[in-house]
Amino acid sequence: MKKRKRLSILVAFLNSSLFGKSFTNLTRNNAYELTIIKVGVAYGTDFQKVREALEKGLEVLKTKDKFGRDIVEPTYGHYIRFDDFGDSSVNVAVRQYVLVSEQIEYRYQCKELIYKILAENNITIPFPQRDVHMIDDNK
């Protein structure tokens, strides 16, 4: 029988916070936690095209862990939302509830897949840009 490695997480906070507030363990009865991955797309991009491409492409991540549990919570799935207007891009948030024990690897896979999906659909991820205007003091 192979011994299972235990996952431990360190949570730190001030003593004054411990005794002065109430805490709720959000994962105690639910093994899923909200995971948000953000990506920027070029201004002028058809947001509906981005949403449809990501929703379809991310379906491959809806798999099961070694215990047969859904890695992405099936009730919620993936939510693709317009997040914000960035300096160089329109930001998109990919929201999903993911098994806590699978989150780290899932985030790596999801980011790589998002990059691939956007590239395959000719959706540009812009790099940060700045316009610099030089003022000639000698005029």
Image (cartoon, rainbow, N blue to C red):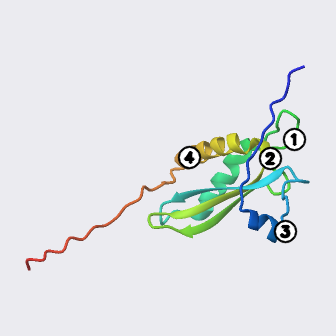
Distance (Cα) linking label 3 and label 1 = 31 Å
Distance (Cα) linking label 2 and label 1 = 8 Å
- Mark 2 neighbour class, 10 Å CA radius: few under 14, some 14 to 19, many 20 or more: many
* Pointer 2 with pointer 1, Cβ within 8 A: yes
In the displayed structure image, the side of residue 20 where residue 12 appears, left or right: left
* Pointer 3 with pointer 1, Cβ within 8 A: no
The amino acid type of the residue labelled 3 equals Ser
- Mark 3 neighbour class, 10 Å CA radius: few under 14, some 14 to 19, many 20 or more: few
Distance (Cα) linking label 3 and label 2 = 25 Å
Name the front one of labels 2 and 1: 2
The residue lying at 60 percent from left, 61 percent from top is: 92
The residue tagged 1 is: 69
Distance (Cα) linking label 4 and label 3 = 40 Å
Name the front one of labels 2 and 4: 2
In the displayed structure image, the side of residue 136 where residue 94 appears, left or right: right
The label on residue 115 is 4
Along the viewing direction, whichever of 7 and 126 lies nearer the viewer: 7
The amino acid type of the residue labelled 1 equals Arg
Secondary structure under tag 2 reads strand
Query: If you read the primary sequence from the N terminus, does the residue marked by circle 2 or circle 1 appear first?
Result: 1
